[in-house]
Amino acid sequence: MNTSTPAAGFAANPQVTARGNFYLRLWRRVPKEFGFLLLGLPIAVVGYSATIALFSAGIGTLVTFFVGVVAIIGALYVSRGFGTLELVRLDWAGYEPIPRPDWQHARARTGFFGWLRSVLANAHYWLYLLHTMAIDFVVKTITWVIAVVWSTTALGGITYWFWSRFLPQDGTQQWHLSDAVLWFLRVPADSVDAKALDPLVYFLLGVVMLATLPFVTRGLTTLHYVIARVLLGAFKSDALERQVAHLSESRGAALAAEGHSLRRLERDIHDGPQQRLVRLQMDLAAAERQLGVDPEKARGLIGEAMRQSKDALDELRALSRGFAPPILMDRGLVAALESAAVRSTVPARISSALPAGLDLPQEIERGAYFVASEAMTNAAKHSGATRIELTVGLRRLPESDETWLDLTITDDGRGGASPADGHGLAGLEERLRGLGGTLEVLSPEGGPTVVSSHLPVTASVTSRVDATDQLPPSP
């Protein structure tokens, strides 16, 4: 036997519950949306008055050029301010933030004429002017009137039964809203007292308008949001231009880092293995001359040559580790970091949160390994550290669903490290920038020193991470 009550069945219906939740969400946004609409007209009037005055003055005095251009630029900057205020108000009203446009500040820093071109040739300034000086003023006037009339009619209708008794009664024939309702229902007007029916009709009208108020405020505010997204938002080409500029900068940084590495390799080879090999050649030549004259001396020269060859081989192995040690290619980043920690003259500990079996791109692994190797070398040579901590893991950005590899090296040394030009950290910063990453160095006097590298991991690599591995979100 079904013992559920109709009320219980109604509440258990997921569609009804969803509709109820949607309506409640609409009501929660009403105060902010109504406040947005109510403040809109005064702001639009001020923006319209200021921009129309400046722009008209600029056009009227354009014959003097300087005064006219200054007034027009003033109108553009004022409209930019009011347009930005509109975006901020929409954010406050609970809407998804609209991407801000590119104001070409880089071009403006090139001098006066660069700044002038960045303003007058930027379409965003003129769209903001069009929005503030014309479109926004008209639309806000209409939406303000609708919002105010709708809300006041709703409140007035609900409370009509109370304040109607204070209306003056002069005894003349008056029209009642009930007359229109009775006519619509085809009820004879003389069969019902229209004046007595008015409070009920006004109350029902007020209830209907109050119940639909959330839809009205949402619709009017959404209209402003759509207009702002079209006129005040960034162009798709802005993101493309920034991406091209970033890629060009990354390419330049990669080339600079490669050149720095080659020059450093050339210097290290010249100062190390090359000198030892020259010494080895001289010792072997001297030993060859002494073989028939003094075999014992020749044997000593050969022994010295063997030591020189061993030292040269050790230095060549050390230089090869600066490119990509075999263990990095064969067993991955974590194994290479553990090997570097074992070779370090300062005790080092590795803490890895990388998913098991993750196959990172080789350039990402090399970049992370170079950061760890250089940071540990600096700690051993310059900081006087007694302990080094390395942590490595993946981090996912929730807003873009991108995944980054984070590597942090911390030592307890005296601090004072900085990525100054000509130092190893500067070369690492260029190398990471060439890979689209960043390097952060925090090293106050007295320590500790924290070197953090952040490298973007491609989407193809992220998809190979097992679905059960949960990546920590960006802090």
Image: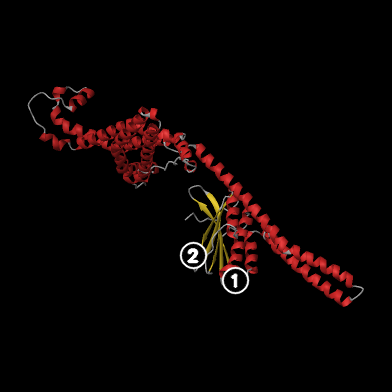
Reply above or below: 232 against 187. Answer: below
Q: Position of residue 460 (x, y in %)?
A: 60, 48
- Residue 136 showing in the rendered view: no
Direction from residue 358 to residue 238 in the image, left or right: left
Mark 2 or mark 1: which comes first in sequence?
A: 1
**Position of residue 303 measured from the top left corner of the image (x, y, whole percent):** 82, 73
Residue most extreme to the bottom: 296
Which residue does the numbered mark 1 point to in the structure image? 347
| Amino acid type, residue under disc 2 in the picture | Pro
Q: Amino acid at mark 1?
A: Pro
The answer to which of 95 and 417 lies nearer the viewer is 417
**In this view of the protein, which residue sits in the foreground, 311 or 404?**
311
Asked if one can make out residue 414 in the rendered structure from this viewpoint, the answer is yes
- Residue 444's disc number: 2
Which quarter of the figure has residue 55?
top left
Residue at (15%, 25%) from the top-left corner?
175
Give the residue at the far right of this rendering.
292
Mark identifier at residue 122? none
